[in-house]
Amino acid sequence: MATVKVTPEMIAQALADTDWAAQDSLSDEEIARRVVADPDAAPILSDAETAAALVRTVRHRLGLSQAAFAARFHIPAGTLRDWEQSRKKPDTTAMAFLRVIAREPDMVARALDPVTR
């Protein structure tokens, strides 16, 4: 795959060339159709799908199975499974907990370990 260097001038020109009135007039349905039709566009994810991607990414980055991740971070395995499969969306507190795990997994594990408390 070729790498393209994007310069600030290229960005400025692209912004200047964009018909913002036409963009603003698009309906959500038209935007969704265009995203689906464009093979280079990332899919539009629901909140639950975005949360599921975060949970899976963090777990995979740590190299843990669902059971190991759930045990290490005191999350019910069924809840973790529901999050990863987009059946349920983590609430705001759970999302904050997942973000802390993503940044400081060892610190969180130590904090939850009854031996180190």
Image (cartoon, grey):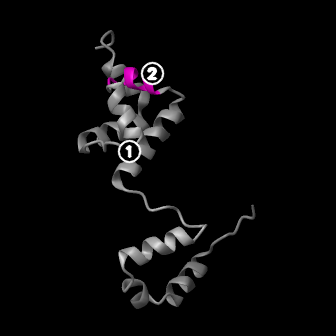
Q: Is residue 52 above or below residue 7?
A: above
User: Does the magenta run of residues contain 15?
Assistant: no
- Residue 103 visible in the picture: no
Q: Which image quarter: residue 41? A: bottom right
Q: How many marks?
A: 2
Question: Quick check: 90 left or right of 59?
Answer: left
The dot on residue 68 is 2
Question: Quick check: 16 left or right of 116?
Answer: right
Residue reaching furthest to the top: 115
Q: Residues within 10 Å of mark 2 (few under 14, many from 20)?
A: some
Q: Nearer the viewer, mark 2 or mark 1?
A: 1
Residue lying at 36% horizontally and 74% vertically, measured from the top left: 28
Q: Secondary structure at mark 2?
A: helix
Residue reaching furthest to the right: 2
Q: Secondary structure at mark 1?
A: loop
Residue lying at 40% horizontally and 50% vertically, measured from the top left: 49
Camera-side residue: 79 or 103? 79
Residue 51: image location, x then y, percent = 38, 46
Q: Which image quarter: residue 105? A: top left
Q: Earlier in the sequence, mark 2 or mark 1?
A: 2
- Residue 90 visible in the picture: yes
- Which residue position holds label 1? 86
Q: Quadrant of the N terminus?
A: bottom right
Q: Residues within 10 Å of mark 1 (few under 14, many from 20)?
A: some
- Which region of the structure is painted magenta? 66-74
